[in-house]
Every structure is written in C-alpha cells, then in structure tokens.
Amino acid sequence: MSHPDRNKNCPVSHTLHLIGGKYKALLLWHLTGHILRFNELHRLVPEATPKMLTQQLRELEEDGLILRTVYPVVPPKVEYALTPLGESLFPILEAMYRWGSERMQEEGKTPDCSMNAGAASQTQSCSHCSV
C-alpha cells in the first residue's frame, strides 16, 4: 500500500526545495562572504537571464536565505547578502562542489565554472569556508 504523504516532511526534499532552483546554488555560493549587487551577480552567472535571476533572488529572499537591501538613492542601489541561515548552507554547497568535481574528473572532465573561480576568494573572506 502506498502512502502519498510519506515524504511530505523529508529533510532532503526540503533542502532541495530551498536550493534546487536553476541558479540558486550558484547565487548562494557567490554571496558567501560577499555583498553583491544585481549586475555583479549577473556577471558571475551570465547564463541567467535578468528575469530568471530576479526570480531566483526573490525566492531566496522569501525563503530567508538572502537579504535584499535597497538604498534610497538615485539611481536605486540594491545589494544582496546572505542571512545567517543562508550562510549555514555553505558546507552543503561545498560538499556538492567537491562531490561533483570528483565525479567529473573520474569521467575525464575538468570542472570549470564560476564556483571554481570564486573558491580562492571565498577562503579569504569567509571564516568558515575551506574550499
């Protein structure tokens, strides 16, 4: 007999719901230890259209993972930063990066993405990062 609600409160499903958007993991990674503006994030994740980037940032904000600060200046200045809850995801993202890198290398592929480029700067600016 199947139970349709059996995985309703699954911790892995819950985590994937929070970080499983098309660019959410990349955005969270790049915001670790940094405060970035929209255009900076778009440069780091250029494959995301502005509309998709906005959608992903809004969802991350609604879920309490990032903080969006709007400054009352002309032109408008908006900055994005991780909340403590968002910062707590870094070990998960780091583990995903390492696991994926190992699998790719086993397949003869070289990991090459914006997460790799940011790894060196992350260790300098983030006390809990050890990439």
Image (cartoon, helix red, strand yellow):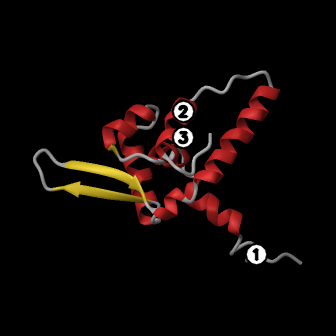
Q: Which residue is mark 3?
A: 123
Q: Nearer the viewer, residue 23 or 4?
A: 23
Q: Secondary structure at mark 2?
A: helix
Give the residue type that dot 2 points to: Ala
Residue 13's disc number: none
Count every numbered label the image shows and give the total. 3
Q: Nearer the viewer, residue 5 or 120?
A: 120
Whether 19 is drawn above or below 13: the answer is above
In the image, taking residue 72 as reference, residue 78 lies left or right, namely right
Instruction: Give the spatial CA distance, label 1 vs label 3.
Output: 43 Å
Q: Which residue is mark 1?
A: 4
Quadrant in which the C terminus appears: top right
| Crowd class of label 1 (few under 14; some 14 to 19; many from 20; radius 10 Å) | few
Q: Position of residue 117 (x, y in %)?
A: 53, 29
Disc 2, disc 3: CB below 8 Å?
yes
Residue 120's disc number: 2
Q: Position of residue 60 (x, y in %)?
A: 45, 58
Residue at 35% across / 37% down in the picture?
40
Instruction: Give the spatial CA distance, label 2 vs label 1.
Output: 45 Å
Give the residue type that dot 3 points to: Thr
* Marks 2, 1: nearer the viewer: 2
Residue at 71% across / 33% down in the picture?
101
* Marks 1, 3: nearer the viewer: 3
In the image, taking residue 53 as reference, residue 123 lies left or right, namely right
The mark nearer the N terminus, 1 or 3, is 1
